[in-house]
Amino acid sequence: MSRASGAVAAVDLGATSGRVIVGHVDQSAGRLELDQVARFRNGPVRMTSGLHWDLTGLYRDLTRGLADAFRREPEVASIGVDSWAVDYGLVRGDRLLGEPFHYRDARTEGAVERVHARVPFAELYRRNGLQFLPFNTVYQLAAEGEGQSGWLGLAESLLLIPDLIGFQLTGAKVTERTNASTTGLVDVATGEWDDDLIAELGLPASVFAPLVDPGASLGALRAEVAAELGAPDGIEVVAVGSHDTASAVVAVPMRAESAAYISCGTWGLVGVELERPVTTDAAREANFTNEGGVDGRVRFLHNVMGLWLLSESVRWWERDGETIDLPELLAAAASVTSPVAVFDANDPRFMAPGDLPGRIAEWCREHDAPAPRTRAEFARSIIESLAAAFAGAVRTASVLSGVDVETIHVVGGGALNGLLCQRTADHAGIPVLAGPVEATAIGNVLVQARTQGFAEGDLESLRALVARAFAPRRYDPSVR
């Protein structure tokens, strides 16, 4: 039943921070407003066993944020959770068997070869449609028990990060489909777990929870959780596009199929939205992925390293206590007039935390390119390299999918980076429309709102509401 308007709470968990946001939706009035009620830090913790997420601390912080949300807006109708992909926790009964591993942990280095020895990558791609990334869940699972404690053999359930949070909130053990599509264990044609592939890889089929679609109810908050949050009885948790990019793409204000999107944050996810997957040899060789989207759409995209290159460089420079003003650094980068190196933003050496400026300089020396000398030059080199990689990925997506891309939408934190948006338009030779910045939270809110009856219609109807509420900024290619 349709209701005129209402409020929902979005828990949006990123690789460096998390937020709790209350979204107010009134589709008939064109109202779509976000109220951030909590923000908290997130990041890896290095233990003797490797690099992990502090899920215990993350759950503590997000529940505090939800309590703030109910104090501020007692009429919140539901909660939805999204996060990054591929990482998971193992559960036995009601117990989490250790903190989840971080996707940047090095434990999968040998596991990749073991997986491909059983199922060659070309066959994997035909079946799961996923680009090769060494941290995909399928490789992480192959590493379980090797140098570890064999937790997979003890587990009753494997739950991805948003599903783990949903389990803690409601007790439901399910896996949301858009995020499941990033594991490498879902059949790209059917959208269901590939039981044959799971068996071929020697994985226990019993740990994979039932799949649910965005918009499904996980059930009401557990009574003790509702009491802790100050929430009314019966508040439900709704499955959204729980892979943060799936939620972000819901909020891309595309009005035509001729558009590409870049969901730009820690990662830059560059692609087009399709009705059917593309699993050709050319797509595999270009390392493009087919991931699940809301309403059965396909996110045909390529991962680019993203603003991680800049944020980790800044973190490295600040390690001795210095504070760097990012807007000032970007302004200085925009003022650089001398040519800077355009390096391969997807080089694997840039994956791990640490001295990224040093690795960029190393790449330049190896390729006879002038290495940046100042921080402004490093920042400009990063921006130019990302813009070139983004533009190249858009061109490749167009060729592989047959979509004649005429416009690029940049959403997420990268939409605030005017230099990056302008240089992406320049490299691509087509306009860039920047915004909304909070695309992931907006997509999370809209899927919940549609479930609650505060909005209705297909993705195009939801995107029309986004376009009315958040006018994008246009960057035209520079005339040269």
Image: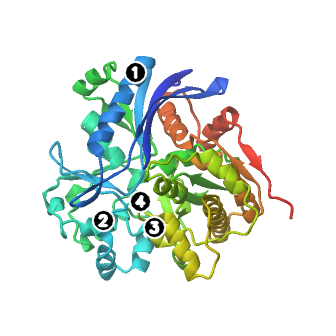
From the top left corner, tell me how far across and down residue 461 is, in percent: 63, 38
Distance from label 2 to label 4 (Cα)? 12 Å
Contact? badges 4 and 1 (CB < 8 Å): no
Q: Nearer the viewer, residue 437 or 271?
A: 437
Which badge, 3 or 1, is on the more N-terminal residue? Answer: 1
Which residue is at a point 53% across and 35% down the rendered structure image? 446
Label 1 sits on what residue type? Phe
The residue carrying mark 3 is 130
Q: Position of residue 40 (x, y in %)?
A: 41, 37
Tell me the number on the disc at residue 70: 1
What is the C-alpha distance between the residues marked 2 and 1?
37 Å
Which picture quadrant has residue 180?
bottom left
> Is 283 in front, or is 189?
283
The local crowd at label 4, few if under 14, some if 14 to 19, many if 20 or more residues have their Cα within 10 Å, is many
Which residue: 34% across, 21% down? 231
Task: Describe the element under mark 4 as helix, strand or loop.
Answer: loop
Percent coordinates x, y for residue 472 in the rendering: 71, 42
Disc 1 element = helix
Residue drawn at 31 percent across, 82 percent down: 117
Q: How far is disc 2 from disc 3 in space, using C-alphas? A: 15 Å
Q: Which mark is residue 140?
A: 2
Q: Quadrant of the C terminus?
A: bottom right
User: Are the residues flagged by discs 4 and 3 in contact, CB closer than 8 Å?
Assistant: yes
Cα–Cα span, label 3 and label 1: 39 Å
Reading the image, the residue beneath label 4 is 182
Q: Quadrant of residue 148?
A: bottom left
Q: Earlier in the sequence, mark 2 or mark 4?
A: 2
